[in-house]
């Protein structure tokens, strides 16, 4: 069943930072009532934040044989906020061994979303 809510939000797409409100049925995005935006892009942002908010998820994973204990990773596309806790469970299972290059895919097609988890830096292996 569709949700009928009201949400207040601030548009982050430009420095004006318009304060907006959105209400209506999440199953009918075209009929949502949106107030406060000063441009069309703001409306698109408000619909997205109201019906399917997403975030780029950043975290770290264990790495062995490296000068650091953990390596930073992130999603290669924004992930639905509702999946963030499940995504963290998957990320917490990852264990890498150096050397690892920046941009290496460490989880492909995370939770069947088509989104990958990739490393955001390189780490060389420890030398004896
Ligand atoms: S609604 Fe438009 S003008 Fe307002 S902050 Fe967003 S992008 Fe900027």
Image: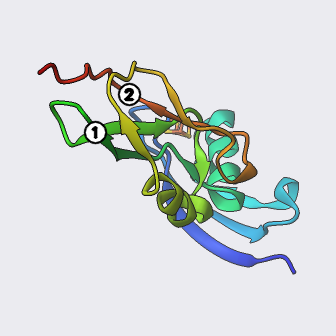
Residue 7 on image: x %, y %: 58, 69
Q: Is mark 2 within 8 Å of ligand 1?
A: no
Which part of the image, by quadrant, shows the C terminus? top left
Between label 1 and label 2, give the one nearer the viewer: 1
Q: Residue at x 73, y 40 (%)?
A: 114
Residue 43 on image: x %, y %: 68, 44
Mark 1 → mark 2, Cα distance in angstroms: 16 Å
Instruction: Answer whether labels 1 and 2 touch (C-beta < 8 Å).
Output: no
Q: Which residue is mark 2?
A: 120
Q: How is the image coloured?
A: rainbow
Residue 74 vs residue 82: left or right? left
On screen, residue 107 above or below 100: below
Residue 80 on image: x %, y %: 63, 54
Mark 1 or mark 2: which comes first in sequence? 1
Q: How packed is label 1: few (under 14 Cα within 10 Å), some, or many (20 or more)?
A: some
Q: Which residue is mark 1?
A: 64
Q: Which residue in the rendered view is the most extreme toward the front?
A: 128
Viewer-side residue, 28 vs 69: 69
Task: Give the mark count.
Answer: 2
Q: Residue at x 63, y 44 (%)?
A: 45
Viewer-side residue, 29 vs 95: 95
Residue 76 on image: x %, y %: 56, 32
């Amino acid at each position: 069943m569709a949700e009928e809510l009201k949400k207040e939000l601030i548009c982050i797409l430009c420095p004006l930072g318009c304060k907006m409100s959105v209400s209506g049925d999440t199953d009918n995005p075209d009929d949502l009532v949106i107030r406060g935006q000063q441009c069309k892009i703001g409306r698109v942002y408000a619909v997205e934040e109201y019906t399917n908010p997403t975030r780029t998820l950043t975290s770290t994973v264990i790495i062995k044989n490296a000068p650091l204990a953990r390596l930073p990773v992130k999603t290669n596309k924004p992930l639905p906020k509702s999946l963030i806790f499940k995504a963290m469970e998957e990320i917490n299972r990852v264990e890498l061994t150096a050397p690892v290059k920046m941009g290496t895919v460490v989880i492909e097609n995370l939770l069947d979303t088509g989104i990958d988890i990739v490393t955001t830096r390189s780490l060389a292996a420890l030398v004896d």
